DNA sequence: TCTCCTCGAGATCT
DNA sequence: CTCGAGGAGA
């Protein structure tokens, strides 16, 4: 399963970051010790923000670690460290302009790993909260791994995720955009402590406005644990009161299988009820039409001809003399015109 | 009705 | 990474 990706000649040269990454069976990087991404509104937490030389933990380095300790929703302590990476030439002009961090500011700074150690001490086992927090955590995690230090394993809360869930209709969900929308001051952004404070205010806003709303949080938790409400046929109703009783769909029970090309399933089901038909979610003795969508992409289908279980069942019922028609998507649309 | 799986699309972090 | 869409099986 998970193996260290050591190259055969690693002993004869200096180890690089990628030598330490753990890969899954498909070659993707995994970080098994990482804490869980939580769905809750704690009063006590640590906010974390990093400034780095770039976006990729594989090649980029940490320049600054900022953190804030919050107890009872109140800031009680700040933590800030500059870090001087081994190769200071990695600090591009772009990043200097973005963050305002110059090489001179890092002259007396220690190596990132010392900042990480201090931060982990500061954080203890608190919940760590951040904006797109995986970005920051992955940097800490990978850097620790390359230094043979136990990587950070605190549980996490991603405030960006909360923003996307609760603030709809924003042009985007960048920290700055969200702060602006909530009238939160974002001066001094792109420095660690400043971004921590902005993130704290965004989180507190969501917590106060939405975290106390029982209905909203119920929805939140439901979605959070992926207990998605399945599409229920009975929920699809029609406003129409008069139907053409000669229409081929009138009074007929329709079931769909596979992905439709021209519309989604919900729209198709709406058409069925609009013509006086009924939807079903499985093939039964009541079923009159099975509409075949595209199953090409579905790897779960084991039938050699690529037929879904719904189709196989429908064919059996048809053989046994039931009034059931198996039709293609296009035939379904043709029927609507009749 | 519930749980688990897969896939693709779309963002954000410096 | 996260989510929604969709299918399968119990």
Image (cartoon, coloured by chain):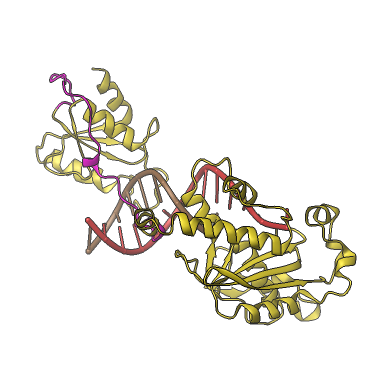
Chain colours: A yellow, B red, C brown
Residue A251 image offset from top left, x and y in percent: 13, 29
Tell me: residue A82, above or below residue A217: below
Tell me: residue A40, above or below residue A258: below
Q: Quadrant of residue B1?
A: bottom left
Q: Quadrant of residue A255?
A: top left
| Residue at point 23%, 17% (across, down) | A338
| Residue A8 lies in the magenta stretch | no
All told, the count of numbered labels is 0
| Residue at point 23%, 44% (across, down) | A281
Residue interval drawn in magenta: A223-250
Answer whether residue A231 is visible to the viewer in this image: yes
| Residue at point 11%, 34% (across, down) | A323
| Residue at point 57%, 66% (across, down) | A129
Q: Quadrant of residue A19?
A: bottom right
Viewer-closest of A230 and A223: A223
Viewer-closest of A54 and A308: A54
Q: Is residue A212 left or right of residue A147?
A: left
């Amino acid at each position: 399963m998970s193996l260290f990706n050591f190259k055969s000649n690693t002993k004869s040269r200096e180890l690089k970051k990628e030598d330490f990454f753990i890969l899954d069976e498909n070659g993707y990087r995994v970080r098994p010790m990482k804490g869980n991404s939580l769905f809750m509104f704690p009063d006590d937490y640590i906010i974390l923000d990093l400034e780095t030389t770039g976006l990729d933990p594989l090649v980029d380095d940490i320049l600054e670690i900022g953190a804030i300790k919050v107890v009872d929703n109140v800031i009680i302590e700040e933590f800030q460290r500059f870090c001087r990476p081994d190769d200071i030439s990695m600090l591009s002009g772009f990043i200097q302009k973005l963050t305002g961090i110059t090489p001179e500011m890092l002259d007396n700074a220690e190596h990132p790993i010392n900042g990480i150690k201090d931060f982990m001490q500061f954080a203890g086992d608190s919940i760590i909260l951040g904006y797109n927090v995986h970005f920051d955590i992955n940097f800490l995690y990978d850097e620790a791994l390359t230094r043979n230090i136990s990587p950070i394993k605190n549980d996490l809360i991603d405030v960006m995720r909360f923003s996307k869930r609760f603030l709809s209709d924003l042009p985007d969900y960048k920290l700055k955009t969200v702060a602006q929308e909530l009238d939160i001051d974002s001066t001094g952004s792109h420095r660690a402590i400043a971004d921590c404070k902005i993130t704290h205010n965004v989180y507190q806003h969501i917590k106060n406005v939405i975290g106390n709303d029982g209905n909203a949080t119920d929805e939140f938790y439901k979605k959070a644990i992926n207990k998605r409400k399945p599409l229920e046929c009975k929920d699809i109703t029609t406003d129409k009161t008069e139907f053409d009783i000669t229409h081929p769909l009138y009074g007929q029970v329709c079931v769909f299988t596979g992905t439709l090309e021209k519309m989604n399933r919900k729209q198709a089901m709406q058409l069925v009820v609009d013509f006086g038909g009924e939807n079903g979610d499985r093939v039964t003795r009541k079923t009159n039409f099975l509409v075949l969508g595209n199953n090409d992409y579905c790897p779960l289908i084991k039938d050699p001809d690529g037929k879904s279980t719904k189709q196989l069942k429908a064919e059996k019922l048809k053989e046994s003399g039931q009034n059931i028609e198996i039709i293609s998507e296009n035939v379904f649309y043709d029927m609507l015109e009749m």
